[in-house]
């Protein structure tokens, strides 16, 4: 048995558009809260002795190249690396075009590519992690349809940033149906984009 954490839509250094129109709005405190949330997530993964962390898209908030964000993220991933905790990431609509994806991360970080779904098998714990990043912000393809079938005898986990059907109030990026997901036979889908828990 193993433990893992699933996070999505961290939106590091979000500009919080609209806050500036309110007098005395805590803009800086809000931006710091996102970093504090990532620090807490890392602390939780360490405290729970997780095997890995998955981030299902929108780690960053936009296309800007903010080296401070990259350095902060790298520091946090190094904390996990020091404890032997792996990290699996797919990019979503907000971070698909960021220049930060060209950075070098600690060796425990695996970012899935955008050309096709990829699989990482973790033999020591019997898990298979499947993922695909967005190649561009307005990804319209049904990425889930291209994910491989489950690998028998493994715990299969899919990581996907998607506008799952039934969430019409979100941009329809990488749309898919519940059947698209369940038909793969995975044990768990780590989804991002729709900011709801279900």
Image (tube, grey):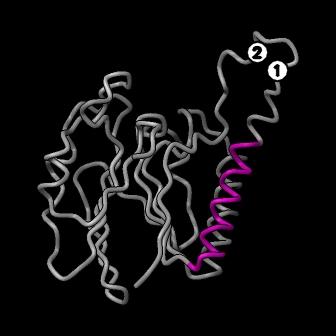
Would residue 40 appear left or right of 9 to someone viewing this image?
right
Would residue 110 appear left or right of 158 to someone viewing this image?
right
> Marks 2/1: CA distance?
7 Å
Q: Position of residue 61 (x, y in %)?
A: 56, 35
Q: Position of residue 26 (x, y in %)?
A: 82, 27
Residue where numbered disc 1 is placed: 25
Is the residue marked by circle 2 packed among few (<14), some (14-19), or many (20+) residues within 10 Å? few
User: Which region of the structure is painted magenta?
Assistant: 33-49
In percent of the image, x 26 and y 70: which residue is there?
156
Residue nearer the viewer, 57 or 4: 4
Q: Does the magenta stretch include residue 47?
A: yes
Determine which quarter of the picture holds residue 45.
bottom right
Q: Which residue lies furthest to the front in this view?
A: 198
Tell us which disc is closer to us: 2 or 1.
1
Residue where numbered disc 2 is placed: 20
Q: Say whether marks 2 and 1 touch (CB < 8 Å).
A: yes
């Amino acid at each position: 048995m193993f433990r893992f954490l699933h996070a999505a839509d961290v939106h590091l250094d979000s500009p919080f558009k609209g806050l500036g129109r309110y007098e005395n709005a805590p803009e800086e405190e809000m931006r710091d809260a996102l970093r504090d949330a990532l620090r807490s997530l890392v602390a939780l993964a360490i405290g729970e002795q997780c095997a890995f962390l998955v981030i299902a898209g929108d780690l960053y908030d936009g296309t800007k190249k903010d080296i401070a964000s990259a350095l902060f993220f790298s520091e946090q991933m190094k904390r996990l690396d020091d404890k032997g905790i792996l990290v699996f990431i797919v990019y979503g609509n907000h971070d698909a075009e960021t220049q930060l994806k060209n950075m070098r991360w600690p060796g425990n970080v695996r970012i899935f590519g955008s050309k096709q779904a990829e699989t990482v098998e973790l033999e020591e714990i019997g898990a298979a992690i499947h993922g695909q990043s967005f190649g561009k912000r307005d990804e319209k393809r049904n990425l889930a349809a291209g994910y491989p079938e489950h690998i028998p005898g493994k715990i299969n986990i899919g990581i996907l940033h998607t506008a799952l059907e039934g969430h019409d109030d979100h941009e329809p990026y990488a749309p898919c149906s519940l059947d698209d997901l369940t038909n793969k036979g995975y044990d768990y889908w780590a989804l991002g984009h729709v900011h709801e828990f279900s």
